[in-house]
Amino acid sequence: MFVKDFKEFAIKGNAVDLAVGVIIGGAFGKIVTSIVNDLLMPIVGIILGGVNFADLKYVIKAAEGNTPEAAIKYGNFIQSIVDFTIIAFCIFLLVKFINQLRKKNEIPAPPIGPTKEETLLTEIRDLLAKK
């Protein structure tokens, strides 16, 4: 029974679509991260005077002996924000494109006729107009 239920769940379109989306999203995220880290941020760093964002940090406590420094690495945080923004924008464009394709393929629904109440009210109006 459990295996049958799981099989029905796994074969449903929603579960398969979700799995495909997660896999493609992970691969897409790696591509965008590479674009940001390897292409975009070096150019932005040069424009800002040779700044390497990966090296930006606020040292709370300097390294002493074998103890490493304690630092807030806000440069990596800035890169993560840029990654997220680019990924979100690309996903927005993709969803917008898919929605446009769906609208082109949809057949418009025929107009729904008046409800029973509207028909009755129209008849009453017409009768009152005749008097």
Image: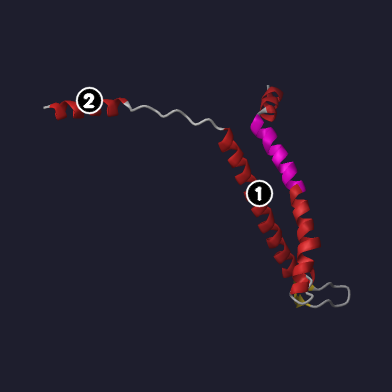
Residue under the image location 83 percent in, 76 percent down: 63
Across and down, in percent, residue 90 comes to 67, 51
Of the residues under marks 2 and 1, which one precedes in the sequence? 1
Task: Give the secondary structure at mark 1.
Answer: helix
Residue 91's disc is: 1
The amino acid type found where label 1 is placed reads: Ile
- Residue occupying the point 70% across, 66% down: 78
Q: Which mark is residue 123?
A: 2
Binning the other alpha carbons within 10 Å of mark 2 as few (below 14), some (14 to 19) or many (20 upward) gives few
**Residue drawn at (85%, 78%) of the image:** 64
Q: Position of residue 41 (x, y in %)?
A: 76, 66
Residue 46's quadrant in the figure? bottom right
Decide which of 16, 98 is in the foreground and name it.
98
**Residue 62 position (above or below residue 126):** below
Q: CA distance from mark 2 to mark 1?
A: 52 Å
Nearest to the observer: residue 51 or residue 71: 51
